Amino acid sequence: MRLRALAAAAACVLALVAAPTLGADTLRSLGQAAGLHIGASVHADALQTDPAYARLLAREFDLVTPENAMKFSVVQPERGRFDFTQADALVDFAEAHGMQINGHVLVWHQQLPPWLEHGDFSREELKDILRTHIQTLVARYRGRVASWDVAAEAVDDDGHLRETFWSRGIGPDYLALAFRWAHEADPQAHLRYNDYGGEGDGAKSDGIYELMAELRRKGTPIHGVGLQIHASLKDAPRASEVRINMKRLAALGLQTHITEMDVMLSLPASRADLRAQAALYRDMLQACLAVPQCRSFSTWGATDRYSWIPEFFPGQGDALLFGEDGRAKPAYDSVRRILRSGKTGYIR
Ligand code: XIL
């Protein structure tokens, strides 16, 4: 009897000692304790070809956004021909690892297929194309994709509605229509608007706020706002402004999210820059933790190896929490530290 009790006690101790290696200290587990989903955008090819990358994603994150796999040109390369190969692989991967999926992106003026961009469509035809596109995607993943970036980057730097393929072709109400169509296809999905450069104070941030207020006033089924936060050390929003901005958006009845954070550094990055980058990640995460309605914190990519930054901003890179080799960077440690102390006292 005594022996069995001893064995049981030993097993308990072992379990306690072993717990950290079971992932108690990963971003996703710390995020769970702090009431926050921790996400990354996923590179479709790397998911297939790089097992270490896939393991890192599953270990550290509990929320994924397809980097390109659900964009218009990938999903509908020809009119009426839908290709879900990459999107299905991502959804299967996420489900196998208990990760939430954020669909990205239903109506955006970039990465449109040539048949659409160079087609000559009437307003009614464009409405029909957009409705079919949105509803085909959302219905396919109904109950599996928890949230959608329904619309993105619809506001320009001055805070006005951006003139785009969609606003020209359908008119400004394309936004409300997109949300309504998405909601019809999956009434449970969390629908959000996603934009960059309007995180802190300023004309763009005011424009986004006004647009959100208007959509809410009209009863549009919109539930959240994503702040992208593509930053550099010279050009980053102030944490206090981000917090205040999130609070005013939350007062409209919206959840808020940090959706695409990265902090590009001049290459090769110095130690001092890596430390400054860590501080910036810390500050943005703290702003999110200070607002009960801020429900997720995502980076645009997971490791520097597959980050979009070097291609789009030559000479820049090193923007994420994990290096080219998948090793954690100072920014990873600072995010973990903040999550560990992230007991906020309220339920998210
Ligand atoms: C980027 C991808 O990372 C690139 O691979 C692609 O070539 C262009 O788009 N804001 C967004 C994302 O919402 O969809 C963009 O992703 C980056 C900026």
Image: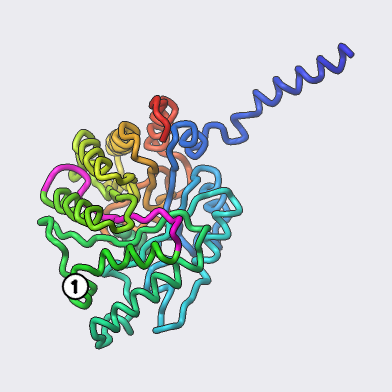
Magenta segment: 186-202
Q: From the viewer's perspective, tell me whether residue 32 is left or right of residue 125.
A: right
Find numbered disc 1 in the image and state the secondary structure of the residue it sits on.
Answer: loop
Q: Which residue is drawn at 30% across and 46% down?
A: 254
Total number of numbered discs in the rendering: 1
Q: Is residue 99 above or below residue 344?
A: below
Which class describes the residues within 10 Å of circle 1: few (<14), some (14-19), or many (20+)? few
Q: Residue at x 18, y 75 (%)?
A: 168
Residue furthest out toward the bottom:
120
Q: Position of residue 225 (x, y in %)?
A: 30, 50
Q: From the viewer's perspective, tell me whether residue 164 is left or right of residue 34.
A: left
| Viewer can see residue 266 | no
Looking at the rendering, the quadrant in which ligand 1 lies is bottom left
Q: Nearer the viewer, residue 55 or 185?
A: 185
- Looking at the rendering, which quadrant does residue 21 occupy? top right
Amino acid type indicated by mark 1: Gly
Residue topped by disc 1: 171
Q: Which of 274 and 341 is in front in this view?
A: 341
Q: Position of residue 329 (x, y in %)?
A: 41, 38
- Looking at the rendering, which quadrant does residue 122 occupy? bottom left
